[in-house]
Image (spheres, rainbow, N blue to C red):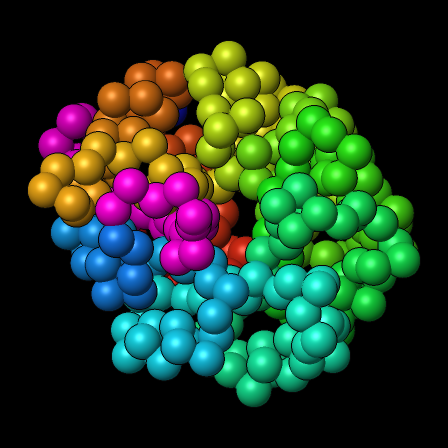
Amino acid sequence: MKNRQMTPEELKQIPFVETHCHLDWEFAEAEVTPASLMDLCDEENATYSLLIGADPDTQIEAIRERKERFGYLLWPRPKDLRWWAGYEQILLDNRDVIRGIKLHPHYDRYFAGLDLLEDVFASACNHDFVIATHTMDDPTSRAEQFRPMLEKHPRTKLILYHATPFDDALALMKEFPNVYMDISAGAFGEQAMLKALDVVGQKKILFGVDTPLGFPVRDGKYQHHLRDVIEKEIALWVDYDENILRDILYRNAAKLLNLNISE
């Protein structure tokens, strides 16, 4: 039996969790601060958003004031003297705001492997926080490179940003219970969405679009785009299927992040 289809009006009000928002982005076309990014999400009535930042000393407190709707993904840099013990302490001291970490091997020029990341994955399992990682089809961070860490720590909550290479990412999601993909960049498109739904199912897909990458800019300010993506792309790709949309837009993220979201 076909699931119920949402109406366009219902879709405009549906809750959603944006799992991939950038505070530190050198190619930004307009100002990006905790305040401006939170305002952008507020204006589109995002239920909850994860903001990624590499400057916890200035960013955490701003987000703490709005922690009912915003969380922080700490971006640890291996070349920083705080690696890993110092970053772990920052995370543990601020668990009310920090929901996990974001890794970016390509940008930070390191290889995703056991030698550098095993302690990180062990900590994520021990302390129940999320790891989100950039994945890319290059020697630094192909999705398959995270398999050794997952084999040693299979309960890790891992988000594969961009899910690249796609078949490798799908294989990890199928094998490990807490591995998810977002729908940004390499994983973004109708055929990718339909393939993911067929191979791993709707429970492993998160809404995350690399906010504010690709958003329109006017008068030096990023303009709305999140609801456009939901309404003009995702909903069309899944034929307005209410059950699929609710899973992708907020139910899966609520389970992963232990959020209480009213329907």
In percent of width and height, residue 223 lies at 17, 40
For residue 227: magenta? no
Q: Quadrant of residue 220?
A: top left
Does residue 10 appear left or right of residue 18 in this picture?
left
Q: Quadrant of residue 7?
A: top left
| Residue lying at the far top of the rendered structure | 191
The residue stretch that appears in magenta: 7-30
Q: Is residue 57 above or below residue 193?
A: below
| Camera-nearest residue between 112 and 232 | 112
| Camera-nearest residue between 25 and 251 | 25
| Camera-nearest residue between 157 and 55 | 55
In percent of width and height, residue 107 lies at 62, 46
**Viewer can see residue 51:** yes
For residue 10: magenta? yes
Q: Is residue 61 above or below residue 244?
A: below
Give the residue displayed 40% in from the left and 42% down from the top.
27
Does residue 52 appear left or right of residue 65 in this picture?
right
**Viewer can see residue 175:** no
Q: Quadrant of residue 123?
A: bottom right
In percent of width and height, residue 208 lies at 43, 42
Q: Is residue 24 above or below residue 138?
A: below
